[in-house]
Amino acid sequence: MTTFWAHLPLIKLLQHEFAQYTPATFRRDLLAALTVGAVALPLALAFGVASGADAAAGLITAILAGLLIGGLGGAAYQISGPTGAMSAILLVIAQRYGLNGVWVACVLAGIALITLGVLRLGRYIAFIPSPVITGFTSGIALIIAIGQLDNVLGVQTPSAENAFAKLFHYFTNPIVPNWQTLALASLVMAIMIVVPRLTRAVPASLIGIVVAALLATLAQWDVPIIGAIPRSIVLDERLTLANVPWGDLTNLVAPAVSIAALGAIESLLCGSVGATMTGKPFDSNQELIAQGIGNIVIPFFGGVPATAAIARTSVAIKSGAETRLVSILHAWCCS
């Protein structure tokens, strides 16, 4: 039995990571986790809203993904959570099937991801042509940008079936932007462009949020706010067996495939980039299994689908991350 466990991929990865772990290594992991947490927290809140849920769902997702996916993943440096690319898909699913549909699709996607990992199909993601990945990610970027125009302009337009219909609505129905909301959005964007050119010691996204929040508070501007942050890791609105939309299960297969495909591509590409940056091993199949487990569990706590995030992972690596404790500790920082 001992020999069996010793040959499991995850056990081998853990043995390699912690073979020479010292207090000095823990300090580096802790500092990296604090830095990643500062970056991940505002992103989690924003992507929770962008996914069609709320900020609390994004926060819960970041915490659970950091613990489960980070702890079971195929690399020492991966940081998972809600992402902008995933939000673009989830928003459409939420509009059609509601949050229950998003949660069920997430569970189905998790099962698919585990299946891919168990069948050891992770390595085949590397054979996807680069132009396909470029077009895929560029399209997602456009969907995210168009989907956030209401928030940037401070207006509320009717729900649209797709991003292009949403964009067409702006041209056919002139709107009057809320200048206060537009000013805050412009300020944050300017900070995120300028600050990295001056220093990378403090995350630009965190500076932008702090400055904008202070300005809105001191000037007493009437702008939408995120709302209360949950005090429990289990949200009131979450997936339960009682609210599973059994009649929509067939319709949710296609969205689940989309979530699984995006989760696999984004996580494995992130892992490959991280392996190149660090020279550390990356087990693509173990990563898929971890992503699957995380996405099966997260909906039952009220979160949204998660995947590895290149931005957060690169911050962790550049901050001196050594082991997967960074992901686990960053989850604690978010909580």
Image (spheres, helix red, strand yellow):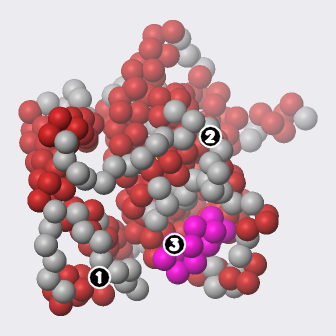
Residue 311: horizontal and vertical position, in percent?
34, 47
Above or below, comparing residue 162 to residue 197 in the picture: below
The kind of residue tagged 1 is: Lys
Between residues 114 and 165, which one lies in front from this camera angle? 165
Disc 1 target residue: 166
Residue 42: horizontal and vertical position, in percent?
36, 43
Q: Secondary structure at mark 2?
A: loop
Between residues 91 and 127, which one lies in front from this camera angle? 91
Task: Single out the residue that lies furthest toward the top.
Answer: 23
Q: Which residues are magenta?
A: 93-104
The kind of residue tagged 2 is: Ile
Residue 274: horizontal and vertical position, in percent?
40, 44
For the residues marked 1 and 2, what is the alpha-carbon distance in whole angstroms?
34 Å
Above or below, comparing residue 260 to residue 182 in the picture: below
- Say left or right for 278 vs 260: left
Residues packed near mark 3 inside 10 Å, few (<14), some (14 to 19) or many (20 plus): some
- Give the residue at x 75% y 60%: 240
- Whether the magenta-drawn stretch holds residue 101 is answered as yes
For the residues marked 2 and 3, what is the alpha-carbon distance in whole angstroms?
22 Å
The kind of residue tagged 3 is: Ala
Disc 3 target residue: 94
Disc 2 target residue: 233
User: Can see residue 24?
Assistant: yes
- Give the residue at x 59% y 43%: 64
Residue 35 in which image quadrant: top left
User: Can see residue 211?
Assistant: no
Residues packed near mark 2 inside 10 Å, few (<14), some (14 to 19) or many (20 plus): some
Which label's residue is closer to the chain start, 1 or 2? Answer: 1
